[in-house]
Amino acid sequence: MTDMNPDKARRSASLHRPDARTRRRNAAEKRFRACGLAAILLGLFFLLVLVATILRNGAPAFTRTVLEIELTLSPAQVDAAEAEVFKTRAYAQLFIAALQDQLETRGLDVAFDAGALERIVGQPGGTIRAHFQANPGQIGEPVVFELAASSRVDGYFNGRVSRATLQDSRFLQASDLDLVDALADAGILRRAFNLTFLTGADSGVDNPGGAGIGAALVGSVYMMFVVLALALPIGIAASIHLEEFAPKNRVTDLIEVTISNLAAVPSIVFGILGLAVFIQVLHLPQSAPLVGGLVLTLMTLPTIIISTRAALKAVPPSVRDAALGVGASQMQAVFHHVLPLAMPGILTGTIIGLAQALGETAPLLLIGMVGFVARGYPEGVVAGFTEPNSAMPAQIYTWAARADAGFYDKAWGGIIVLLVFLLTMNLIAILLRRRFERRW
């Protein structure tokens, strides 16, 4: 038997030169890291595409096309208009005369009639008459009116409507675009920030330009108050009992499995439950934030219970043992020591559950919050809970289902508002977590 050369054995087993097996292992690790990095970059790419798509499609909802004109009506003109049978038509004629004067002053000679003006800005006569009736002291003084243009004129300005694709209809005709261009060149027709979108309410199926998400946002806030007032105490109390006080037996095991299964139940099932129990049995008001909040509370409770129990389990057992060792009762150990340490996780789980409930649409379909169109704000705090209203996800769904393309911009804009609301809630969760976080 031939002895191996010692120098050759040392060279082959040198720590400075990895062997073939080590090189394969290192290569596999590099490939795994590269795959992980590629997955992260791919996820970031799709996230950026999604955000860019939402911002691009939703940005037009925050601006609108307005016709701005200064109008001065003398007392004689107002009296003459009020003496007419068709008063709004008389005010519209005064508006047309003032508009023609301003175009001629700017050196633009464009002929138009009342029909073309109505297709561009609706019926200005009613708006002007209502303003001077509410402000009689401004008669004889110059007043600047800012009238919202129609949805198709607004689409012409933001690129959704073009001369090539426009077909003559009762809403807008191709010849009206000459007047639109002239008004834009004169600075009378321009783009402005659409505050109505943030503060207004749904305007019906024929007026996408006047639609707003403000009333639906208020409805969502009322629903979140109901969810917070019910889900937070019930969820925390149930979690503390199951984790700290309940005996470990088959009953508690069955309860834990049931809670875990409820967290995976589709949200529309909770909507059917709310329709059957809260509306058909208890006869609570349909389409009300109160019913919506109750349904979302049932849907959110499993999430809050699971996250709260996880936060309680994360507290070291030594904290409980130390509290019991100095003479504290089990309740004192839980409420004075365990619960404060678990509070950051509890608050984070609660706000995540609320954010999940805020974006749900399916349960609201079953209780009628999509069929009801909110045309205004509630008259009081109690009415905000009991009167029919809408919610942001339901309002977005309603806009997306309408035929007029002008509502698509509103739907994308509503998504932006909803995402800002969700990001704000998550930011609050982070701040609360850092505020109540304790280290041991």
Image (spheres, helix red, strand yellow):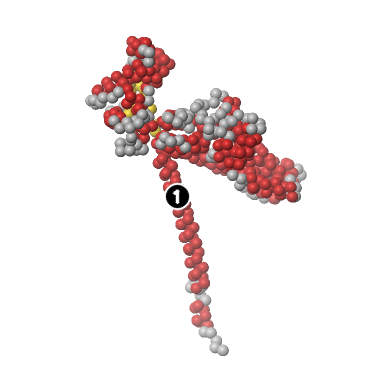
Residue 199 versus residue 71 in the image, above or below? below
The answer to whether residue 298 is visible is: yes
Residue drawn at 27 percent across, 21 percent down = 101
Residue 17 versus residue 414 in the image, above or below? below
Q: Pinpoint residue 397: horizontal percent, then vertical percent.
A: 49, 37
Look at mark 1 in the image and give the residue it sits on.
46
Counting every numbered tag in the picture gives: 1
Q: Does residue 243 appear left or right of residue 303 in this picture?
A: right
Mark 1 secondary-structure assignment: helix
Tell me which amino acid carries mark 1.
Answer: Phe
Q: Pinpoint residue 131: horizontal percent, then vertical percent.
A: 40, 18
Q: Pinpoint residue 12: horizontal percent, then vertical percent.
A: 50, 78
For the residue pair 342 and 195, the one nearer the viewer reads as 195
Q: Does residue 157 appear left or right of residue 264 in this picture?
A: left
Q: Pinpoint residue 351: horizontal percent, then vertical percent.
A: 58, 40
Residue drawn at 32 percent across, 26 percent down = 116
For the residue pair 358 and 80, the one nearer the viewer reads as 80
Residue drawn at 37 percent across, 15 percent down = 86
The answer to whether residue 431 is visible is: no
Residue farthest to the bottom, as pictured: 1
